[in-house]
Image: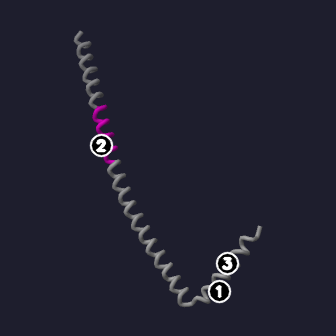
């Protein structure tokens, strides 16, 4: 009977260890999940800021190009008209092909 009692204690100790192991693994999984979420948020913020900066830069460059084209048209209106006419003819021929 001593063996049965000792075996019962070992089984109970093993059950307790397994229970503690489950709790530890659950805690580790929760910690990893929280860390992953916080790192994801940080990356998301950096990407968002970077995209906003790139969008602003592209917007400014586009505005500069439009101003440059407007200046060129003001300086050389006949040349600009001729270029627009030739481009229109070219596009008309290109899209007219069926």
Circle 2 or circle 3, nearest the eye: 3
Q: Name the one closer to the observer, 55 or 24.
A: 55
Q: Position of residue 56 (x, y in %)?
A: 41, 69
Contact check, label 3 and label 1, Cβ < 8 Å: no
Q: Position of residue 24 (x, y in %)?
A: 28, 35
Label 3: which residue? 88
Please name the predominant secondary structure of the magenta segment in the image. helix
Q: Residues within 10 Å of mark 3 (few under 14, many from 20)?
A: few
At x 30% / y 40%, what residue is drawn? 28
Q: Position of residue 65 (x, y in %)?
A: 50, 79
CA distance separating discs 3 and 1: 10 Å
Residue segment shown in magenta: 21-35
Disc 1 on helix, strand or loop? helix
Q: Name the one closer to the observer, 71 or 38.
A: 71
* Labelled disc at residue 31: 2
Disc 3 on helix, strand or loop? helix
Label 1: which residue? 82
Disc 2 on helix, strand or loop? helix
Dot 2 or dot 3, earlier in sequence: 2
């Amino acid at each position: 009977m001593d063996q049965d009692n000792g075996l019962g204690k070992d089984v109970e100790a093993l059950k307790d260890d397994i229970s503690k192991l489950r709790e530890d693994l659950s805690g580790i999984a929760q910690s990893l999940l929280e860390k992953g979420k916080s790192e994801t948020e940080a990356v998301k913020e950096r990407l968002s800021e970077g995209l906003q900066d790139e969008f602003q830069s592209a917007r400014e460059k586009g505005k500069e190009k439009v101003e440059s084209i407007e200046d060129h048209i003001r300086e050389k209106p006949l040349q600009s008209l001729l270029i627009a006419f030739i481009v229109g003819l070219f596009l008309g021929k290109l899209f007219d092909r069926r």
